[in-house]
Amino acid sequence: MTEKVEYWVKIPFGPIHPGLEEPEKFILTLDGEKIVDVDVKLGYNLRGIQWIGLRRNYIQIMYLAERMCGICSFSHNHTYTRAVEEAAGIEVPERAEYIRVIIGELERIHSHLLNLGVLAHDIGYDTLLHLTWLAREKVMDTLEAVSGNRVNYSMVTIGGVRRDIDEKKRRAIEEMIKYYKEVFPQIEEAFLHDPTIEARFRDTAVISKRVALEQGAVGPTGRGSGIRDDARWSERLGVYPDLGIKPVMPQDVTGERPRGDVFDRMAVRIGELWQSLELIEHALDAMPDGPIKTFPKDNVLYAKLRLMVDGEGIGRYEAPRGELVHYVRGKKGSDKPLRWKPREPTFPNLFAVAKGVIGDQVADFVVAVASIDPCLSCTDRVAVVQDGKKKILTEKDLLRESIKKTREINPDIKGDPSPLGVGCVR
Amino acid sequence: MSADEVHDPVAEEVKEPTKAEEVAKKIAERFPSASVEVKTNKWGRQRVWVRVPREDYKALMGFIKELDPEAHYSIGIEQDWGEELGFLAHLVIHYRDAPAVSLIVDVHAPKDDPVIPDISDIFPIALQFEREGMEMVGLDFEGAPDKRRLFLPEDFPEGIYPLRLDDKGISEEMVKNAGHPYLIKKGGKE
């Protein structure tokens, strides 16, 4: 009698792997080239932010929340702020709501362009990576013009926004819209009608609607699988209903029924690029004059929050990657929350895609993970053009500049912050 | 219209119950042990807050799935309430037409018996939040099919729960130095 022998092997994929942009570990069980099972292990980048949050006041947490993710920093700040506003019963001026929409949609454009580039890069199609990332520069420059920063914009505060959009900033945004109306058709054509893209993305990592529902998939991952939900729409968030928000489904872009594959998730993002442009245009037109925050000074806000936060609040927002939730519980008289918990969209999406890749080839795994748009870390060098001469700043230069700046701000600083570069772990 | 007519309750227009109010009513009728409240925030958004004894928790989650088979389990939050531990879940139901119903289910267990039923057979994603709850505050989800740690390392000591308000913290020996010169100086143990 012959015994059937199964040649299954388990291989670790990550936490550090050339195909992953961030540390996360998957244990793949393989039958030859076929994926049989996936186990997810998280926590390699756990920075204890919830723990730190319990030791910071409500205003400090705004900036901490923003630094959870460089790509969707507005989303975290905005959602946390909504949760505190709900717990404290603070209203937001209408103009601030429109500014929140504009910054949120600018962030969505940069996040989606980034992910489209990453997807193309993962199949070796670097021409498209360069096309999308070149286009992304325009929205990054616009965000810098509006907020002063390319990431971590600090635009939102509890009870409003911190900076207004004046005529100059408005012109920068309008110029950006004009630019994208010329560029987006090229990007759309390249991604939706390229045979290479279709061959690699169609029917890859199919997440069925049933699996998406079971695993709580959100954002383009959920909508790509046919779940018609968008937190901006289903939450009736701020002024989004007035701007005619609707969830973008794959059929709106491809004309076909959702299949839940990588292609559909990509198609949703392309549809949302157009939707974001439209929303920004509408918001600029409809934005009323008036105040941009309820409490003009932070010390007043701090004092009010001590008295006003008494109970629980939930903030829900559709970040570029999907539904983002923040929960805040506070007690009257304290300036700190008793509990603050964020749930970012990658969390349920990772478990959904881990189910979706079962039965696929191991070579598709990198594309499958990239298709849910997990977070990325950023730049380690900067190029500066000064007096017509280009200079590349090294790590040591950046440290030197940072020390110089610290001394400018506080000349009385004690101790020597050097040695230069020794503290950097390579 | 006179001022009397404005305040006459009989003359007031009868409002149709909202989706959230209907859901709250159904839950209150089915689970008399639960305390159900519909709260409206400053923007007019309604949320249904349900506090349920742990004996009825699993049945309530099953009932929510009956109300909407496509209910979305959005977040599970482990909490320390002092004498008790809690687990709060936010769900979104009836989202095919905006606004969706935002539903919050809260369940508590005493610290000396921190057992709450597992509901991952009803909402499979809940298991991952439960795993987080087990490692962060020390809740025990009875019947959970996977009780391994999700975020914390395997060598993290037993009985220490980072998000408990009475958290004791890990020992000095467990702090791994990342090679930063200031940390080496401060520790001074090399």
Image (cartoon, rainbow, N blue to C red):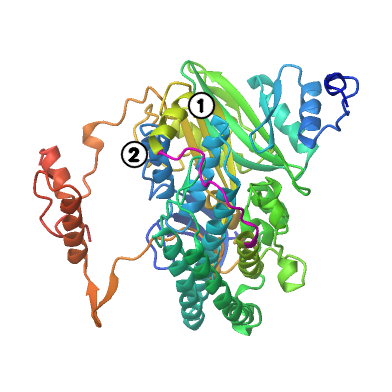
Residue B113 in view here: yes
The residue stretch that appears in magenta: A285-297
Question: Mark 1 belongs to which subunit?
Answer: A
* Image side of residue A119 versus residue A154, left or right: right
| x then y, percent, for residue B179 | 18, 50
For label 1, the SS is: helix
Real-space CA distance between mark 2 and mark 1, rounded to the nearest whole angstrom: 42 Å
Quadrant of the frame with the N terminus of chain A: bottom right
Eyeballing the image, is A264 above or below B138? below
Q: As rendered, which of A393 and A384 lies closer to the eye?
A: A384
| x then y, percent, for residue B70 | 75, 45
* Image side of residue A278 versus residue A338, left or right: right
Q: Main secondary structure of the magenta part?
A: loop
Residue A30 in view here: no
Q: Amino acid at mark 1?
A: Met
Eyeballing the image, is A218 above or below B130? below
Q: Which residue is mark 2?
A: B155
> In the figure, residue B72 lies in which quadrant?
top right
Residue in view at x 51 percent, y 51 percent: A75
Q: Amino acid at mark 2?
A: Asp
> In the figure, residue A227 lies in which quadrant?
bottom right
* Image side of residue A42 versus residue A196, left or right: left
Q: Are marks 2 and 1 in contact (CB under 8 Å)?
A: no
| x then y, percent, for residue A399 | 19, 60
Q: As rendered, which of A177 and A393 lies closer to the eye?
A: A177
Residue in view at x 54 percent, y 71 percent: A116
Residue in view at x 42 percent, y 51 percent: A154
Q: As rendered, which of A278 and A66 lies closer to the eye?
A: A278
| x then y, percent, for residue A281 | 62, 65
Q: Which residue is mark 1?
A: A308
Q: As rendered, which of A203 and A422 lies closer to the eye?
A: A422
Residue A293 in the magenta stretch? The answer is: yes
